């Protein structure tokens, strides 16, 4: 191979990232080589900062640099609603809608029986004391798949004794899709989740 | 080559940014793994057709000597809605698909196994009660297909017809022979217990239920009644029986997770 070992090493690291194939990894490595040293240092520092500074919020388990996180410590947010999600990226997606003004709880995944992932691998225990603390409604916002469904079924049973209202987000048709192309499962769930107009 | 076949989805794994790697048990080719590109995108044409425990009509680009095929199209034939929305049904169905995934090798066609899988999910979906029975009935029929059928009509030692009644009687099931001893032979066999690490004690109710699970038409399995204790006994017996005959069979992850839920 007529190339520098360091370039190869860097390309190999890039290739481990999601969505990056061998070719792209190589192109990125060569691009880094052309960058100013200062820029590269900034990039490297940013990578290290993510690992050093980011931790999990002790209340909602979202990723944060300050504990409690900004959402949990915001007094303007409605403390009586908790929206349970699988991953920090789901909080980001829901925040973009600006619809929800309550608090979150991030499980760090979903129940995945086929992979042996049960409630002990998720932050379920941490949810319970929060629910008993004057919360009106818990909204379950899991992914629309078997793992998300198993998690929703489990949490709704688990939360029943707390006497709190438990809801799930409607499983409807994805926006921009045609009704006629929807499969039976999606369409029947869209009917189930109908609301008054 | 473009191939079309019906398939039950056994497993669906996230792959790269928006894709999935899906394991199917197909009617025509047995187990197949394939990539479904863009399947996690909300605009994906696959919808819920790639979710485990779904019967789908699958179109794949199939190449020989390729481990991972490419899903071209996949449409739902049966969504098994109740299996997907009730915990107890889901526990049974996931245990079944996990067991099939563990037992089968890629591209070994087995039509009988495919039909058994579909029939079991059909019955589980329709059933109103005793969901676990469908798992037991599946295991019993699986043993038959894999060549170690249980024989529950006659005593495996003297050949006398087995009555399997008498609440207090315990019978001995011989795991290696796949049969039960009558009370008389059980007494003798029990004394010979030293040679018998393949012998397993079964109370009359469990032995009787085992026989009925074996002989009842699958559509009628939900009507079979037995106590929780007998259910636990059946579960343990069949697990040991499959483990005895299938080398390297691992405990089912799904079964363990559902046990840990306690709700
Ligand atoms: Zn927080
Ligand atoms: Zn006998």
Image: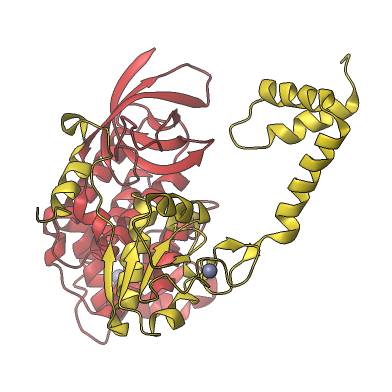
Q: Which quadrant, please, contains the C terminus of chain B? A: bottom left
Question: Which chain is rendered red in the image?
Answer: B
Counting the numbered discs, the total is 0
> In terms of image quadrants, where is residue B72?
top left
Q: From this viewpoint, which residue is outermost toward the front?
A: A76
Task: Report the side of B16 relative to B128 (left or right).
Answer: right
Question: Is the residue B120 above or below the residue A20 in the image?
Answer: below
Task: Report the side of A26 relative to B194 (left or right).
Answer: right
Q: In x, y percent, where is residue B33?
A: 45, 32
Q: In x, y percent, where is residue B257?
A: 44, 65
User: Residue at coordinates 58% horizontally, 69% vertically from top-left?
Assistant: A57
Of the pair B111 and A118, the residue shown nearer to us: A118
Q: In x, y percent, where is residue B256?
A: 45, 66
User: Residue at coordinates 19% horizontally, 78% vertically from top-left?
Assistant: B165
Q: From this viewpoint, which residue is outermost toward the bottom?
A: B168
> In terms of image quadrants, where is residue A150?
bottom left
Of the pair A113 and B171, the residue shown nearer to us: A113
User: Residue at coordinates 52% horizontally, 61% vertically from top-left?
Assistant: A108
Q: Is residue A104 visible?
A: yes
Q: In x, y percent, where is residue B262?
A: 37, 77
Question: Which chain is rendered yellow in the image?
Answer: A
> In terms of image quadrants, where is residue A76?
bottom left
Of the pair A54 and B254, the residue shown nearer to us: A54
Q: Is residue B184 visible?
A: no
Q: Which quadrant, please, contains the N terminus of chain B? A: top left
User: Residue at coordinates 54% horizontally, 76% vertically from top-left?
Assistant: B194
Task: Report the side of B248 relative to A191 (left or right).
Answer: right
């Amino acid at each position: 191979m007529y190339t520098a070992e360091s370039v190869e090493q860097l390309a190999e690291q890039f290739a481990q990232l999601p969505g990056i194939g061998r070719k792209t990894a190589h192109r990125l490595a060569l691009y880094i080589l052309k960058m100013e040293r200062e820029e590269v240092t900034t990039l490297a520092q940013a990578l290290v900062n993510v690992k050093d500074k980011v931790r999990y919020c002790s209340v909602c388990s979202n990723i944060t640099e300050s504990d409690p996180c900004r959402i949990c410590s915001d007094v303007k947010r409605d403390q009586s609603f908790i929206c349970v999600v699988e991953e920090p990226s789901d909080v980001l997606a829901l925040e973009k809608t600006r619809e929800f003004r309550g608090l979150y709880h991030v499980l760090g995944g979903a129940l995945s029986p086929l992979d042996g992932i049960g409630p002990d691998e998720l932050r379920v225990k941490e949810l319970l004391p929060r629910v008993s603390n004057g919360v009106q409604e818990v909204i379950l916002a899991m992914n629309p798949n078997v793992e998300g469904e198993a998690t929703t079924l489990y949490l709704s049973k688990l939360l029943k004794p707390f006497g709190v209202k438990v809801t799930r987000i409607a499983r409807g048709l994805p926006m921009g899709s045609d009704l006629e192309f929807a499969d039976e499962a999606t369409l029947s769930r869209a009917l189930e989740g109908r609301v008054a107009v | 080559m473009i191939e079309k076949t019906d398939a039950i989805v056994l497993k669906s794994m996230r792959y790269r940014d928006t894709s999935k790697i899906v394991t199917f048990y197909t009617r025509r080719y047995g187990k197949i793994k394939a990539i479904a590109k863009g399947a996690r995108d909300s605009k994906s044409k696959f919808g819920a057709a790639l979710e485990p425990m779904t019967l789908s009509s699958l179109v794949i680009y199939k190449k020989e000597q390729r481990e991972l095929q490419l899903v071209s199209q996949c449409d739902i034939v049966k969504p098994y809605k109740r299996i997907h929305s009730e915990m107890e049904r889901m526990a049974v169905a996931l245990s079944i698909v996990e067991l099939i995934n563990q037992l089968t090798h890629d591209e070994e066609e087995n039509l009988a196994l495919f039909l058994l899988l579909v029939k079991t999910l059909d019955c589980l979906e329709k059933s109103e009660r005793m969901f676990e029975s469908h798992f037991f009935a599946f295991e019993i029929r699986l043993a038959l297909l894999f060549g170690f059928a249980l024989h529950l009509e006659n005593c495996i030692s003297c050949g006398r017809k087995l009555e399997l009644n008498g609440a207090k009687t315990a019978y001995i099931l011989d795991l290696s022979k796949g049969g039960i001893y009558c009370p008389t032979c059980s007494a003798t066999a029990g004394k010979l217990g030293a040679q018998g690490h393949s012998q397993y004690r079964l109370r009359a109710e469990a032995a009787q239920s085992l026989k009925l699970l074996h002989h009842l038409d699958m559509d009628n399995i939900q009507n079979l009644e037995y106590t929780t204790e007998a259910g636990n006994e059946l579960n343990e017996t069949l697990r040991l029986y499959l483990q005895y005959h299938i080398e390297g069979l691992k405990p089912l992850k799904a079964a363990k997770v559902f046990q840990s839920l306690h709700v």
